[in-house]
Image (tube, rainbow, N blue to C red):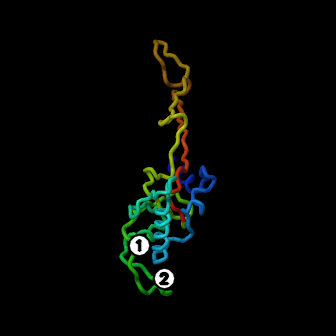
């Protein structure tokens, strides 16, 4: 359930504290190029990396380490395309028009690929830097500091004649309980993620 909530929040492109969407032109972290298993797909990934490396902190310093390993987050439908881009030494040259010639794959081996089964758009893909570190783009937030779920047992109101408590109800020998965990996922940082 929590993974679905995180993915839904992420794909909804939430509004950030600066009133811009998580993925927006104002943040410089969005594109529209489809991921394809050819030169165009390679160029889309290069553009995404360049956009991430252009991000600056509040004092104007670059915050993304150039050349560091990136996480390519994709829907299941793009698994084979991502595998070709990440593993093949050469790719079809789309600039020639026919795709008959091959060019070196400049992005080979640069990505940790994460297949996200809960993505609802088969074309969207994301490139992230250190999603669990200081540039993590989603945060798991909880209510009133409760890091564990609340588990409550309904008091059946039955007393044993010889003393002690009977945890079962009088009529059906059943125990009623409830569980509740109040949490949400909030977009926190746009400078460490790129979406297309």
Determine the image quadrant of residue 109. Answer: bottom left
Q: Residue at x 46, y 75 (%)?
A: 37
> Crowding at label 2, few (<14), some or many (≥20) Cα neighbours within 10 Å?
some
In which quadrant of the rendered view does residue 169 lie?
A: top right
Estimate the x, y position of residue 131 in percent, counting from the top left: 45, 54
Residue at far top of view: 162
Instruction: Determine whether the residue tagged by mark 2 lies in a helix, strand or loop.
Output: loop
Farthest front residue in view: 59
Q: Is residue 30 above or below residue 186?
A: below
What label sits on residue 188 in the rendered view? Answer: none
Q: Indicate the position of residue 21 as horizontal and vertical percent values.
A: 61, 56
Q: Nearer the viewer, residue 40 or 120?
A: 40
Q: Of helix, strand and loop, which one carries label 1?
A: helix
Q: Residue at x 52, y 53 (%)?
A: 58
First reached walking from the N terminus: tag 2 or tag 1: 1
Residue at x 41%, y 60% (from the top left corner)? 65
Q: Position of residue 147 (x, y in %)?
A: 48, 37
Q: Determine if residue 181 is in view.
A: yes
The residue that disc 2 covers is: 94
Q: Nearer the viewer, mark 2 or mark 1?
A: 2
Foreground of the two, 187 or 115: 187
Give the farthest residue toward the right: 19
Image quadrant occupied by the C terminus: bottom right
Q: Are marks 2 and 1 in contact (CB under 8 Å)?
A: no
Residue in the foreground of this view, choosing between 55 and 108 = 55
Q: How many marks?
A: 2
Q: Which residue is mark 1?
A: 84
Q: Would you say residue 74 is visible in this rendering?
A: no
State how far apart marks 2 and 1 are (Cα).
15 Å
Residue 70, image x, y percentages: 42, 61
Above or below for 158 versus 181: above
- Front position in the image: 85 or 127: 127
């Amino acid at each position: 359930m929590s993974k679905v909530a995180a993915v839904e929040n992420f794909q909804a492109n939430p509004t950030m504290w600066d009133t811009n969407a998580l993925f927006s032109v104002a943040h410089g972290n969005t594109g529209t190029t489809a991921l394809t298993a050819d030169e165009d797909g390679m160029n889309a990934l290069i553009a995404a990396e360049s956009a991430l490396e252009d991000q600056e902190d509040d004092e104007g310093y670059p915050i993304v380490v150039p050349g560091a390993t990136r996480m390519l987050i994709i829907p299941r439908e793009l698994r084979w395309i991502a595998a070709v881009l990440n593993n093949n030494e050469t790719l079809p040259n789309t600039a020639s028009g026919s795709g008959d010639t091959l060019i070196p794959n400049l992005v080979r081996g640069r990505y940790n690929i994460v297949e996200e089964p809960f993505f609802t758009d088969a074309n969207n893909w994301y490139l992230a830097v250190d999603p669990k570190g200081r540039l993590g783009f989603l945060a798991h937030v909880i209510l009133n500091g409760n890091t564990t779920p609340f588990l409550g047992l309904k008091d059946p109101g039955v007393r044993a004649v010889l003393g002690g408590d009977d945890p079962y109800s009088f009529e059906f020998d059943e125990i009623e309980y409830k569980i509740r965990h109040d949490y949400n996922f909030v977009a926190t940082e746009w400078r460490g993620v790129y979406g297309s």
